[in-house]
Amino acid sequence: AQSVTQLGSHVSVSEGALVLLRCNYSSSVPPYLFWYVQYPNQGLQLLLKYTSAATLVKGINGFEAEFKKSETSFHLTKPSAHMSDAAEYFCAVSGNQFYFGTGTSLTVIP
Amino acid sequence: EAGVVQSPRYKIIEKKQPVAFWCNPISGHNTLYWYRQNLGQGPELLIRYENEEAVDDSQLPKDRFSAERLKGVDSTLKIQPAELGDSAVYLCASSRPSAYTGELFFGEGSRLTVL
């Protein structure tokens, strides 16, 4: 069985501050892990994905995530938040299907 | 290339009425998914198609939901009759075959409100 848990349904950061969105996964097999972003009234867009290559994955818009097997984590970070980063972020794990987390809403305070 | 196209974007109906959503996937994507996203939740799979075949419909409430993908391209998701609890965003996504190592491409969704 596979699942992801996103810690914190709401995160607020100041513009220019570090963004850290947490995701822990459960998987009985080596996982494929993803972060998707959803802007208001839009579909989900892929930010980045881990598919067993490099453990530090770089994505679009300056985001990156690090796969840590020992911690079963795949946290999403960005060094400096921008107003345009305000959105809903979903972590997902795939095996026989995609399993999405419940999402983290990111607010960026000017 | 054109993305996944869904229609309608918004639909408001009264309970017990029927409703249908349409999806046109990205050209060449054999796999098509319908997800339901409740407010404040992540997407949950309703049905997955490989070409014309529904290969995973275990989460589809078959008493009132139906889906079809004729000719392995466009797909329609129908609810009849709709219930208050069906209010949600219905997302369509497509991917290349064996995409669980790859990426899902999502449409903008169809937001259903059942009154």
Image (spheres, rainbow, N blue to C red):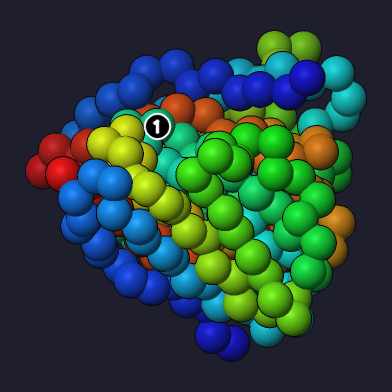
Q: Chain of mark 1?
A: B
In-front residue for pair A36/B80: B80
Could you tell whether B61 is left or right of B101 in the image? left
The percent position of residue A4, horizontal first and vertical second, equals 61, 23
Q: Which residue occupies 35% across, 57% down?
A: B18
Q: Residue furthest left?
A: A110
Q: How many marks?
A: 1
Could you tell whether B103 is left or right of A54 in the image? left
Q: Which residue occupies 34% across, 23% down?
A: A9
Res. B83 image quadrant: top left
Q: Which residue occupies 87% across, 29% down?
A: A30
Res. B25 image quadrant: bottom right
Is residue A28 visible to us here? Answer: yes
**Residue A71 sits above or below residue A89 on the image:** above
Q: Residue furthest top?
A: A71
Q: Residues within 10 Å of mark 1 (few under 14, many from 20)?
A: some
**Residue A95 sits above or below residue A46 on the image:** above
Q: Residue furthest bottom?
A: B1
In-front residue for pair B12/A89: B12
Look at mark 1 in the image and give the residue it sits on.
B41
Q: Which residue occupies 73% across, 23% down?
A: A2
Amino acid at pointer 1: Gln
Q: Quadrant of the N terminus of chain A?
A: top right
Q: Secondary structure at mark 1?
A: loop
The percent position of residue A93, horizontal first and vertical second, equals 68, 34
Is residue A43 visible to us here? Answer: no
Q: Quadrant of the C terminus of chain A?
A: top left
The percent position of residue B65, horizontal first and vertical second, equals 52, 48
The percent position of residue A78, horizontal first and vertical second, equals 44, 41
